[in-house]
């Protein structure tokens, strides 16, 4: 079926208002594919019928926004950020602030990123007290992260076998993250349009592959909220295709080992 223009416009406006994610014309197929399972669960004929139900029932709005929020993730995604965390960021933070690292993993999806950070710390800095706040808009993926249980297919996406053996226990058809690792991560529901989560000031913020979905004004607002909870000298990780250039001059791009990190310029206030 083809989604009616007014139906797509309604969904796009709802998602934009709730999450700042922009669904531009041409993304109708995405809306149809993401909402089709919800339509089946609701027992209605098709996506159009489901959208009519959503228009009439505000309690369904959250599940639409969650369905349209991208939750693509994997263990140690892109590798480079975790190497830089180990080789540059943690040693720098220890030298300046001592052996306690506070991390905010924003848009954490089902937990692979914060647990990858936790494993990096456990493997290379076991004497550093690590606190990780992991946030996402979707309660469904947060519940999965809190449970720390992943299928064979999920653990095969980027997780080295030695780390699987060391940090997970087999529980029937799933692999469960050991409690000692889970205890370092706190999962919370959070919208990047809202005030930052408690737990800071943060030495490191992972905000990877999120800004690409926002317009420039929203990018600036989000980054200024991040700045407000970043510890002095703190570091921000963005996605490889993301940058603060042309967004806000309070940020300095710091070339690091073939990539870049971001931190506030000295003397620049948020």
Image (cartoon, rainbow, N blue to C red):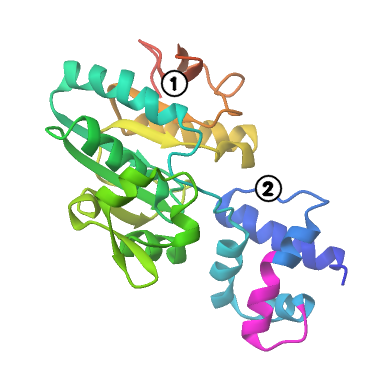
Q: Secondary structure at mark 2?
A: loop
Q: Observer-nearest residue: 2 or 156?
A: 156
The residue positioned 36% from the left and 42% from the top of the image is 116
Q: Secondary structure at mark 1?
A: strand
Residue 137 shows in the view: no
Residue 212 image position (x, y, % from top left): 62, 37
User: Which image quarter: residue 200?
Assistant: top left
Horizontal arrangement in the rendering, residue 51 relative to residue 212 (left or right): right
**Is 206 situated above or below 245?**
below
Q: Residues within 10 Å of mark 1 (few under 14, many from 20)?
A: some
Look at 18% across and 17% down and name the residue there. Answer: 96
Q: Where's the N terminus, which quadrant?
A: bottom right
What residue lies at 13% left-to-right and 28% top-to-bottom?
99
CA–CA distance in space, label 2 to label 1: 24 Å
Start-end of magenta stretch: 34-46
- Up-down relation of residue 262 to residue 65 (above or below): above
* Residue 233 seen: yes
Q: Which residue is mark 2?
A: 22
Report the residue at 51% width, 48% height from top.
73
The residue furthest bottom is 43
Q: Position of residue 78 (x, y in %)?
A: 51, 34
Q: Residue under circle 1?
A: 262
Residue 65 on image: x %, y %: 59, 62
Residue 58's disc number: none
Which label lies toward us, 2 or 1? 1
Residue 59 lies, with reference to residue 248, above or below; the image says below
């Amino acid at each position: 079926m083809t989604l009616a223009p007014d139906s797509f416009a309604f969904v796009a406006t709802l998602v934009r208002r709730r999450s700042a994610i922009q669904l531009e014309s041409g993304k109708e197929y995405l809306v149809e594919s993401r909402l089709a399972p919800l339509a089946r669960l609701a027992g209605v004929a098709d996506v159009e019928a489901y959208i009519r139900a959503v228009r009439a029932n505000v309690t369904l709005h959250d599940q639409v926004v969650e369905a349209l929020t991208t939750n693509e993730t994997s263990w140690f995604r892109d590798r480079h950020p975790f190497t830089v965390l180990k080789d540059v960021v943690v040693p720098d933070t220890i030298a300046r602030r001592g052996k306690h690292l506070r991390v905010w993993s924003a848009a954490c999806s089902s937990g692979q990123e914060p647990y990858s950070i936790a494993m990096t710390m456990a493997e290379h800095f076991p004497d550093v007290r690590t606190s990780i706040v992991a946030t996402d808009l979707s309660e469904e993926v947060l519940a999965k992260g809190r449970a720390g249980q992943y299928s064979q297919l999920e653990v095969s996406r980027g997780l080295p076998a030695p780390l699987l053996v060391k940090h997970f226990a087999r529980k029937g058809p799933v692999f469960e993250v050991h409690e000692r690792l889970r205890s370092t991560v706190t999962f919370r529901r959070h919208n990047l349009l809202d005030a930052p989560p408690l737990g800071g000031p943060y030495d490191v913020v992972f905000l990877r592959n999120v800004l690409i979905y926002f317009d420039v004004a929203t990018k600036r607002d989000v980054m200024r909220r991040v700045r407000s909870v970043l510890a002095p000298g703190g570091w921000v990780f963005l996605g490889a295709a993301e940058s603060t250039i042309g967004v806000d001059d309070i940020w300095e791009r710091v070339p690091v080992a073939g990539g870049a990190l971001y931190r506030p310029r000295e003397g620049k206030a948020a």
